[in-house]
Amino acid sequence: SGHRQEKEYIMRVSVISLVLLVASAPATTAFSPSKITRASFSTSKRSSLSPPFISSKLWSAGSSDDRNIQDADDFDDEEECLPWGHELWQVERIDRISDWTGNQKTFPNPLSLKENVPKSWFVDKDAAIAAKVQVDAHETEADHELGLRSEAFSAAGPRLEIAHDTTKSKAAIVTCGGLCPGLNTVVREVVMCLSRQYGVSEVYGVPAGYRGFKEPDNWRKLDERIVSNLHNVGGSILGSSRGGHDTNAIVDSLVENDINLLFVVGGDGTVRGAAKIAEEVKRRGLSISVATVPKTIDNDVPLLDRTFGFETAVEAAREAINVANVEAEGFPFGLGVVKVMGRNSGFIAMHSTLGSRVVDLCLVPEVNFNFDGPGGITEHLYERLLSHGKAVVVVAEGAGQDLIAAATANGLEEKKDASGNVLLEDVGPWLCRELKQRLDVKLDSVAGTPLNAQGDKVTLKYVDPSYMVRGVPPNTADNVYCTQLAHNAVHGAMAGMSSFLVGSVNARECYVPIKLVVNKRNVIDTAHQSLWEYVVFDTAQPSFSVDSDDRNEADVLISASGGVILASDDE
């Protein structure tokens, strides 16, 4: 008894000393207790990522004991306890079905009832992932609130309490837009997670994209046996399509078929469609969670480290580059040209260029180029042909569109596909014609000299692996990533979240509100220290003029794949 009293006395003295120390600490202390023990959602200012939303405390890293200590001390002035109560983090809020249904009832997560499943496997509701990991070593508390330094996203993963009754739940999965390595893996893992971890047996695949919702008789019931080998197969077992979106008809179909969990897998157009579905669900006050797994081999979804299928596409593109290099090496003045996908973002071209190490020129949509004059690509390739006897060019499909338009001057109206994407001119054959014409003239000028003793012209080999990079099965890295995305989409939906997409931010899985990515895209960052710098130095190509970025560093988010957010014209 005496020993216990002594311990309690020591603890009380320690607590009082700590509180006095904190209350007297300067607010700008580099490692103030507020940064260590407490961080919570702030509504004092909003970042440029999203519009204002209802305030709520989403962050609270301090323990319950910490809060009791603060509550026990009777401070007359709230500012005196600033280091303890000052709100540091702005966590982007995810919609929850309870917001509009008013139903706050929850159920124990079936995972928590399994044997040997530790509580540490579950994600705390206040856990979040910082949007920016690069920090200023001399940052003060005031600096932390500038720009996006305090921006964060809800951490993904299973919650101890869920919002849907698993015994009454029915799920639907739809894949939309172009094909991509990993689509089948996502379908497989959504089914597996729902079945094995939550006991949801009624899972339906909606065929042919959004249009498939109008024909529920054609929905395909999916189970573990049907999806077991899908991760080894390219394409989508459900099929896909562009367009066909009818918001009211889709929600009507969900209601009529008692679907309360919807998983949408697709690119930017599909994500916009999912946002409309989620908004209509909210307007009607329905208990339906809408979760999105973003899909695009172009890697153009903003904020995320990467999208699934991208790494597989880069590997396939690299194989095409190696073929073009072998062909170029086999002939005098061989020129290999490889066109890869990349409508608005040149990530496949950039990453496959860096991965192959044999490319002499990389052309992407983000950087304008010119053929002639100082710093032009013709002179650069001419020098490479003379010094190396061959050259390899990688061009993204969206590069050079301004030059094609200026050269053709056809005055035709801009055309779009069913998903709203602008139909591009085929840059590959056009680039080949322009380069061969110019380089042949230059080689002719030195014919019969030691530089070109045989009077050879350019031997051009054109490789277009565009659809080869889309229809292949995912590699190991993408299979693992698809598994993470699919499972976390299920966990978020079961927790009652809606209108969100799941992805990796700074190598950690998190939930991002759809509204933050709609009408925005991820493009190669050419204005800051990034991967594009490596491309310029590795290829020795001209450093073409790029737009400068005068924003404060605190306002810039650079993704792990070397991207930066760009708002589209229709935002």
Image: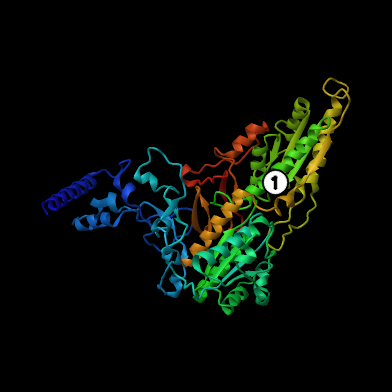
347 horizontally vs 74: left or right? right
Q: Give above or below for 74 relative to 558.
A: below
* Residue 40, quarter of the rendered image: bottom left
**Res. 365 visible in picture:** no
20 horizontally vs 302: left or right? left
Position in image of residue 138 (x %, y %): 37, 38
Q: What amino acid is labelled 1 in the image?
A: Ala
* Residue 436, quarter of the rendered image: top right
Position in image of residue 429 (x %, y %): 80, 45
**Residue sitting at x 62%, y 39%:** 546
* Residue 571, quarter of the rendered image: bottom right
| Front residue of this view, candidates 499 and 380 | 499
Render colour scheme: rainbow
**Residue sitting at x 56%, y 63%:** 192
Q: How many marks?
A: 1
- Residue extending furthest front? 115
Position in image of residue 166 (x %, y %): 49, 72
Quarter of the figure that contains the N terminus: bottom left
Residue identifier under label 1:
316
